[in-house]
Amino acid sequence: MKAAPKALLPWLALLSALAAIAVNAAANALPLNGLKTGEISDRFAVYFVPAGYVFAVWGLIYVGILAFSVYQLRPAVREDPRLAGVRPWFLASNLANAAWVFLWHYERFPLTLVAMGMLLASLVAIHLHLRRGLGPSSPWERWLVDAPFSLYLGWISVAAIANVAAVLDYAGWSGWGLSQEAWMGVALALVVALAWLLALREREGVFLAVLLWALVGIGVRFPNSGFVTLATWGAALLVGLALAAALWGRAGRPSGGYP
């Protein structure tokens, strides 16, 4: 009885990925509840939201999770423990992703934090699992398994901060006496600290590239906002240096290492 559900997991992983992509596409094509995702985001007076073009990264993310979904169905890797350990969390991440879209479009903003937390936790669990052991066994696995999840986790790390900021704005949070600009500085400091942690410990090139992409997008969106503009570009510079350090540190690694 246990073998049947286990055998179904690769197919459930693929179906859940297709469902999450379909929900996200429908959210703006229909759109859900008559509202587009970006239109809702624009309601909130928060700085930690990049320019619209930056969200094109979702296209790469969806290509990546589809690539993983197809790759993990191959008979040659279907029983691989490294991929088997990813599937339950991947399934959870797709369910959380779809749930977030519905909650956001139907304006259940506090509950979006629950879905976002589940999504982030699932991706962190995948990241930690993939970093155990010997790493990817081939360039194919490196780029069809590790790279897509690094990309996804990097973007959701940014999205989680933006989600928290939006919900706090929705709730009318006073900021505990600090200005919005000051809290933006705190958020940027967290991003820079995370970037350097991953640069020094894991040489995470793809993750850091996504952080840099997001910060540049915020700088582009707020070109004349005084401290926020300067702090954002300063943070982007520091993350760019972290990315360079990570790439330099990876220079001597075998080609089959982490992306």
Image (spheres, rainbow, N blue to C red):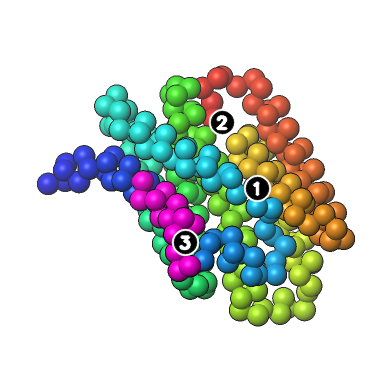
Secondary element under disc 3, as helix, strand or loop, is: loop
SS for dot 1: helix
**Badge 3: how crowded within 10 Å, few (<14), some, or many (20+)?**
some
Mark 3 or 1, closer to the camera:
3
Farthest residue in the left direction?
1
Q: Answer few, some or many: residues within 10 Å of disc 2's Cα (few below 14, many 20 plus, some between 14 and 19).
A: many
Q: Which mark is residue 259?
A: 2
The image shows residue 180, relative to residue 213, as above or below, that is below
In the image, the segment drawn in magenta is: 18-34
Q: In the rendered structure, which amino acid carries the disc numbered 3?
A: Pro
In the rendered structure, does residue 27 fall within the stretch colored magenta?
yes
Q: In this orientation, which residue lies closer to the viewer: 105 or 186?
A: 105
Q: Mark 3 points at which residue?
A: 31
Circle nearer the N terminus (3, 1) = 3
Specify the label residue 53 is tagged with.
1
Residue type at mark 2: give it: Pro
In the rendered view, does 169 fall on the left or right side of 1?
Answer: right
Residue 198 seen in this snapshot: no
Q: Find residue 108 and report its horizontal and vertical position in percent.
A: 48, 73
- The residue at the point 29 percent across, 24 percent down is 76
Query: Above or below — where is 153 with respect to 243?
Result: below
Mark 3 to mark 2 CA distance (whole Å): 36 Å
Q: What residue type is labelled 1?
A: Tyr
